[in-house]
Image: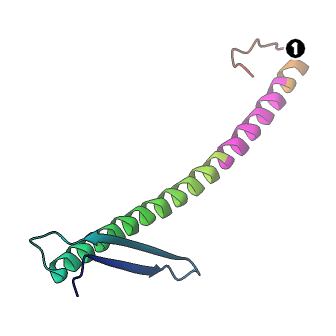
């Protein structure tokens, strides 16, 4: 029997009911043994699994950063609203005393 191809797959479980399979099939070269071809396939798949793990880590970090930025945005919007209300109260109080101010604040 002559082996002409080899293949290798690796299933990775992420612990949250999510799985991913990465695999490769390779044709054995004339000057290559099946074992050498399989070692090459395994090395290739392992490198791809590692890259995917790094990418998943980066995505998780970016999601956390996005969450923090959205919280900060909400806080800043709330602060802006409070400052607008305080400004309007002070402006109204000044007008009651006959002090009129033409604001150069564009809101």
Labels in figure, total: 1
Dividing the picture into quadrants, the one containing residue 6 is bottom left
Q: Indicate whether 41 appears above or below 104.
A: below
- Mark 1 neighbour density, 10 Å: few (under 14) some (14–19) many (20 or more): few
Q: Looking at this view, name the residue that lies furthest to the front.
A: 1
Q: Which residues are magenta?
A: 74-91
Q: Looking at this view, name the residue that lies furthest to the bottom.
A: 1
The residue lying toward the viewer, choosing from 47 and 98, is 47
Q: Looking at this view, name the residue that lies furthest to the left.
A: 31
Reply yes or no: does residue 80 show up in magenta: yes
Q: Indicate whether 56 appears above or below 19.
A: above
Q: Secondary structure at mark 1?
A: loop
Display coloring: rainbow
Q: Quadrant of the C terminus?
A: top right
The residue lying toward the viewer, choosing from 63 and 99, is 63
Q: Position of residue 73 (x, y in %)?
A: 64, 45
Residue at position x 91%, y 21% from top?
96
Q: Is residue 68 left or right of residue 84?
A: left
Q: Position of residue 25 (x, y in %)?
A: 33, 71
Q: Which residue is mark 1?
A: 98
Residue at position x 73%, y 36% from top?
83
Reply yes or no: does residue 82 show up in magenta: yes
Residue at position x 38%, y 73% from top?
23
Q: Position of residue 99 (x, y in %)?
A: 82, 14
Q: Is residue 9 left or right of residue 16?
A: left
Q: Position of residue 53 (x, y in %)?
A: 39, 69
Dividing the picture into quadrants, the one containing residue 47 is bottom left
Give the main secondary structure, helix, strand or loop, of the magenta stretch: helix
Residue at position x 23%, y 88% from top?
1
Q: Indicate whether 49 appears above or below 80.
A: below
The residue lying toward the viewer, choosing from 48 and 76, is 48
Dividing the picture into quadrants, the one containing residue 103 is top right
């Amino acid at each position: 029997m002559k082996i002409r191809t080899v293949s290798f797959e690796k299933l990775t479980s992420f612990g949250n009911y999510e799985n991913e399979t990465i695999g490769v099939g390779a044709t054995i070269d004339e000057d290559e043994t099946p074992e050498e071809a399989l070692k090459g396939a395994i090395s290739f798949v392992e490198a791809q699994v590692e890259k995917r793990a790094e990418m998943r880590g980066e995505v998780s970090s970016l999601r956390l950063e996005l969450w923090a930025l959205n919280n900060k945005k909400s806080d800043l919007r709330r602060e802006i609203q409070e400052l607008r209300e305080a400004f309007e109260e002070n402006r109204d109080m000044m007008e009651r005393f006959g002090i009129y101010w033409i604001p150069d604040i564009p809101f």
